Image (spheres, coloured by chain):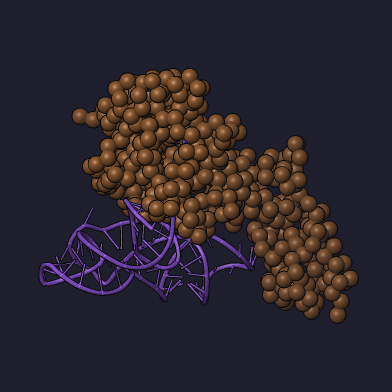
Chain colours: A brown, B purple
RNA sequence: GGCCCCGUGGUCAAGUGGUUAAGACACCGCCCUUUCACGGCGGCAACACGGGUUCGAAUCCCGUCGGGGUCACCA
C-alpha cells in the first residue's frame, strides 16, 4: 500500500522561471495529478543576498499562466528558520554535528593549500573535536560559528534514483559540510531535507544538477533518523549550444515566450515533449493526456536541447485551433503595444480579422504584425513585390480598370468582389495572377496574406479603392518606363 | 582536475537481444492555391568509436572519446 503522493517544486527566487524550471515544475505537477496526490510549492529563499520579491512574483505568475496550480503553499523557507535551528540543535546535542569557528580566511588558506597539493578541497575537520571551553571562549569573543555535519569517512552512499537507477558516491569524497551558516540561516541542503521531511514529501523530482548534492542530503536524513523519500533526477534542458541555459541564449524564460506571443498550452505541450513522449508518439496533445499517461519511468535520461522552431510549430497548431474569443482577447494587448489600437476598439472587427489571419501565423506577435494594414495605411510596398508586380507592362491600366470596377460595385463584399474580379480577368483576357497580385500589393503592401477578397471586405470599398488608386500613383511616379 | 550523469539523424524522440531502426521539427522537391500558410505526397539524414558476451546486439559488459553537471557560509 502506498501512501499519498506528495511532491514539491522549490524554486529559489533569484531569477526568472526558465523553461527548464518550468519543465521540472510541470513534471512534478503531472506526477501529482496522475497519482491523485498533492503538488506543493515552496520558495527556497534562504539566500538573503540574491533573493528578490520581484523574481518570486515572476515565478508564481509564470506557473499560474502555464496552468500549473499548487495544492499547498507557497511555503517560504525564510519563515521557517526556527525549524532548521531546532533540527540543527538536535544534531548538535547528539554529537552528529558541531560548531566550526574557522574564518573565511582560514578556509581560504585551506583551499589554497589543497590546490597547491593538487587535490580537491575538503574541509579538514579542524573544529570537529573542540572542547567545551574552546567553544565557550570563541563564543565569548563574539565569533559567529557555522554548524557542520559530521560525515562518515568511509563507505558509500547510494542514491536510488527512479530515472537513473543506483548511483554510488564514496563517502571519502564528502567533507563535513555546513548545514547552518554563521548568519543563522540554513544552507540549501539542510533546509531542503528538513522541509521535505516535515512536508511529507514522498518523491523528489528535480533537475539533474542536484544529483551530486543528493548523497549529502541522504547523510542528513540519516543523521536526523528520518525516512528517505524517493528520488528522480530529470536531465537538464540545454540551450542550442549544449550548455546550461542563460540570458545570453536569447529567450529562455516563460515570460519572454509569453511576450513573444506563445500560448501557454503550446509551451506546456512542448516542454512535456522535452524528455518525455506519449505512448502513441503523437506530438500535439493536451495536458489531460499527459496526466493520464505520465510516468517517471518514461522520462528520458539524456539532456534535451530545446528547439524554438518546434515550439513555434506547436504554437501554430494551438493558434489555429484556439477558441476564437480567447485568441482575440490574447491578441489585443499585442495590437495595443504596436499602437494599432487604443483603449477603445471594435472587438468584433478585430475578431473577424483574427479568424482569417490566424490560419497562417504561428505566434501572437506574427498575427499582430499581419494585422497592421487593417488599422494603418500602407506606408510602403514590399520591395520584392514591387519588382515583380508593379514593373509589369500594363499594370497601371489593369489597376485602373480594377479600381473603376470596384468603385461601382454594390453591395461590396468578398463574394461580389471576387465575382467582379473574375469577370474582369475574362474581359481583359489576362491571367488572374496579373490582376490579383498587384491588387494585393496595392491594398496590403505585401505579397502574402489572407485571401484577397477577405482583405477587401475587411477594408471596405472606400479604402480598397483608395489604396489601389494610391498604388497607381506610386507606380506612375516611381516606376515609369 | 576529482566525482557524477548522459551518448539513436542538425534538434526532440520511439526502441529494453532478432525491426527494411518508427514518428515529429527543420531542410529539399512535387501537388493544392490569387499569394503566403495549412494540408497531401516524396526525399535527405542516426544507433560516437573499439573490444568483448551471444547463434544474433542500438539494446548486456569493459575501455576510449565526446557532451553536460557538480565541486561555496548559492540554490
Counting from the top left corner in percent of width and height, residue A363 is at 59, 51
The quarter of the displayed image where residue A136 is located:
top left
Check the image and report above or below for B65 versus A131: below
In depth, the one of A83 and A197 nearer the eye is A83
In the image, residue A463 sits, relative to residue A22, either above or below, namely: below
Q: Nearer the viewer, residue A335 or A480?
A: A335
User: Tag count in the figure?
Assistant: 0
Q: A431 or A386: nearer the eye?
A: A386
Q: Quadrant of residue A390?
A: bottom right
Split into 4 quadrants, where in the image is the N terminus of chain A? top left
> Image quarter for residue B58?
bottom left
Q: Is residue A223 above or below residue A23?
A: above
Could you tell me if residue A191 is visible in this image? no
Spot the residue most to the right.
A477
Q: Give the x, y percent position of residue A128.
A: 34, 31
A480 vs A322, left or right, is right
Residue at image point 30% right, 25% down = A95
Q: Is residue A452 visible?
A: yes
Q: Which quarter of the rendered picture does the C terminus of chain A lie within?
A: bottom right
Where residue A451 appears, x then y in whole percent? 65, 59
The residue located at (70%, 56%) in the rendering is A455
Residue in the picture at 67% in, 50% down: A368
Query: What x and y, as percent, mark residue A316?
Result: 54, 53
Q: Residue at x 35, y 24 (%)?
A: A131
Amino acid at each position: 500500500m502506498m501512501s499519498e503522493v506528495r511532491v514539491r517544486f522549490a524554486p529559489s527566487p533569484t531569477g526568472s522561471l526558465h523553461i527548464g524550471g518550468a519543465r521540472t515544475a510541470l513534471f512534478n505537477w503531472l506526477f501529482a495529478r496522475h497519482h491523485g496526490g498533492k503538488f506543493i510549492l515552496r520558495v527556497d529563499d534562504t539566500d538573503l543576498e540574491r533573493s528578490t520579491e520581484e523574481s518570486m512574483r515572476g515565478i508564481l505568475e509564470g506557473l499560474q499562466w502555464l496552468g500549473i496550480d499548487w495544492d499547498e503553499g507557497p511555503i517560504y523557507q525564510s519563515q521557517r528558520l526556527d525549524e532548521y535551528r531546532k533540527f540543527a540543535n538536535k544534531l548538535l546535542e547528539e554529537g552528529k554535528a558541531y560548531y566550526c569557528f574557522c574564518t573565511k580566511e582560514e578556509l581560504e588558506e585551506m583551499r589554497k593549500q589543497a590546490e597547491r597539493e593538487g587535490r580537491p578541497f575538503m574541509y579538514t575537520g579542524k573544529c570537529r573535536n573542540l572542547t567545551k571551553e574552546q567553544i565557550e571562549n570563541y563564543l565569548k569573543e563574539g565569533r559567529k560559528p557555522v554548524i557542520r555535519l559530521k560525515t562518515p569517512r568511509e563507505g558509500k552512499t547510494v542514491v536510488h534514483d527512479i530515472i537513473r537507477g543506483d548511483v554510488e558516491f564514496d563517502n571519502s569524497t564528502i567533507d563535513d559540510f555546513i548545514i547552518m551558516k554563521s548568519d543563522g540561516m540554513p544552507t540549501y541542503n539542510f533546509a531542503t531535507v528538513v522541509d521535505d521531511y516535515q512536508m511529507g514529501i514522498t518523491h523528489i523530482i528535480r533537475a539533474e544538477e542536484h544529483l551530486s548534492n543528493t548523497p549529502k542530503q541522504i547523510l542528513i536524513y540519516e543523521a536526523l533518523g528520518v525516512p528517505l523519500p524517493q528520488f528522480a533526477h530529470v536531465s537538464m534542458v540545454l540551450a542550442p549550444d549544449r550548455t546550461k541555459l542563460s540570458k545570453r541564449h536569447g529567450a529562455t524564460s516563460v515570460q519572454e515566450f509569453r511576450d513573444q506571443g506563445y500560448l501557454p498550452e503550446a509551451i506546456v505541450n512542448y516542454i512535456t515533449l522535452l524528455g518525455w513522449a506519449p505512448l502513441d508518439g503523437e506530438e500535439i496533445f493536451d495536458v489531460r493526456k499527459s496526466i493520464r499517461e505520465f510516468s517517471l519511468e518514461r522520462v528520458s535520461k539524456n539532456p534535451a536541447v530545446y528547439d524554438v522552431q518546434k515550439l513555434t510549430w506547436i504554437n501554430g497548431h494551438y493558434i489555429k485551433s484556439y477558441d476564437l474569443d480567447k485568441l482575440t482577447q490574447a491578441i489585443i494587448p499585442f495590437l495595443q503595444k504596436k499602437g494599432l489600437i487604443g483603449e477603445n476598439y471594435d472587438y468584433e472587427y478585430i475578431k473577424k480579422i483574427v479568424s482569417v489571419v490566424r490560419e497562417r501565423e504561428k505566434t501572437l506577435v506574427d498575427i499582430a504584425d499581419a494585422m497592421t494594414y487593417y488599422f494603418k495605411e500602407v506606408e510602403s510596398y514590399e520591395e520584392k513585390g514591387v519588382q515583380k508586380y508593379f514593373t509589369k507592362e500594363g499594370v497601371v491600366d489593369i489597376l485602373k480598370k480594377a479600381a473603376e470596377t470596384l468603385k461601382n460595385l454594390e453591395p461590396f463584399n468578398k463574394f461580389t468582389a471576387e465575382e467582379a474580379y473574375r469577370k474582369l480577368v475574362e474581359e481583359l483576357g489576362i491571367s488572374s495572377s496579373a490582376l490579383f497580385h498587384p491588387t494585393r500589393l496595392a491594398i496590403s503592401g505585401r505579397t502574402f496574406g489572407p485571401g484577397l477578397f477577405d482583405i477587401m471586405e475587411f477594408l471596405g470599398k472606400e479604402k480598397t479603392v483608395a489604396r489601389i488608386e494610391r498604388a497607381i500613383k506610386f507606380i506612375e511616379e516611381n516606376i515609369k518606363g
